[in-house]
Image (spheres, rainbow, N blue to C red):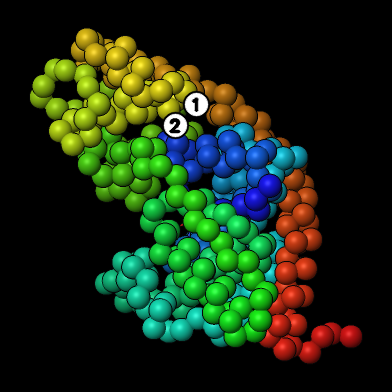
Amino acid sequence: MARVFSGIQPTGDKHLGNYLGAIRHWVATQDADDALYCVVDLHAMTLPYDPAELADRTRRTAALLLAAGLDPQRCTLFVQSHVPAHTELTWILNCVATFGELRRMTQFKEKSAGQESVSVGLFDYPVLMAADILAYDAERVPVGDDQRQHLELARDLAVRFNHRFGPTLVVPEPAIPPVAARIMDLATPTAKMSTSAESPQGTIGLLDPPELVTKRLRSAVTDSATDVRFDPDTKPGISNLLQILAATTDRPLPDVEAEYAGVGYGTLKQTVADAVVAFLAPLQRRYRELADDPAHLDAALGAGAEKAEAITTKVLARVRQAVGLLPRA
Ligand code: TRP
């Protein structure tokens, strides 16, 4: 069993794109792998945020992951700030990472562009992410394409560390899911569905009520032709709807495409809306149960942190020794 690690930020409300692009793969691999999943609350502090909301968002994100099917008996789900090794290893890796390589990170350039003041935390975001991964000897890291450069940095830091201090850290491999899983914005189907979209029109939140889901799908932007066909280049809207239908009904895309080849756009939209509503119903029910019992949720996260810490204690002992720190008597 490969040790797998991935993280998700407790920001925004998670949408169908998050689920189909990442969360469902996490759920699907929790048995095959020794999987650790982390709500990365420390990463959420790198941009201006509201402290009154952070804890609640962290809980809600964890509840959503459980509602989506992560099972604490089969994987380790925990909150980043509950395990101090993440920040400790970040410092040690800060002394291995260079200013030049962090300055080149495209996400840093994008997020800092035009800002009046940029925190050191934002600059150091990729080192914290490297620490997340390396503190667990993770072999595989499932992430979206936008995190490829950060993962490359984590690999570089592990290799450099091992070169400088002797073999200590496991060098992780990326596990980028197939691009076919990309769910597009309903209003602008050439752009990825995203929490930071200009308008929420094109997004389906995992906790959106059925009426809203139906409304959004019925007003999805399509094209002026009438044929239902999978062709993302010339028919991005229709292709996205077919993709969503296939994913939420767990059927192969070609089957879905063949079945709906003759129908009108209106019928297709209503079919997709019904499928998405039916798909979200059990997730939303489980979410409400979890949200109603925060003590139970907190206990599950506490147990997850303990399992996580059992691993980092060993890795950090190795790291401390390698870099030459005096052992505490
Ligand atoms: N930066 C990742 C994202 O925005 C989240 C993340 C933090 C992560 N630490 C990680 C992903 C470690 C994988 C492994 O999606």
Give the distance between the C-alpha atoms of the residues marked 1 and 2, in whole angstroms. Answer: 9 Å
Secondary element under disc 1, as helix, strand or loop, is: helix
Residue 297, quarter of picture = top right
Q: Earlier in the sequence, mark 1 or mark 2?
A: 2
Cβ of mark 2 under 8 Å from ligand 1: the answer is no
Residue 308, quarter of picture = bottom right
For the point 61% across and 78% down, the residue is 162
Please provide percent x and percent y for residue 146.
38, 56
Is 137 situated above or below 322? above
Q: Are marks 1 and 2 in contact (CB under 8 Å)?
A: yes
- Residue 280: which numbered mark, if any? 1
Please provide percent x and percent y for residue 56.
59, 50
* Residue sitting farthest toward the right: 329
Q: Amino acid at mark 2?
A: Asp
Please provide percent x and percent y for residue 189.
24, 37
Q: Amino acid at mark 1?
A: Leu
Is 67 situated above or below 304? above
Q: Is residue 111 left or right of residue 210?
A: left
Secondary element under disc 2, as helix, strand or loop, is: loop
Q: Is residue 89 left or right of residue 248?
A: right
- Residue where numbered disc 2 is placed: 208
For the point 48% across and 63% down, the residue is 151
Please provide percent x and percent y for residue 125.
48, 70
Dot 1 alpha-carbon crowd within 10 angstroms: few under 14, some 14 to 19, many 20 or more: many
Q: Is residue 85 left or right of residue 200?
A: right
- Residue 253: which numbered mark, if any? none
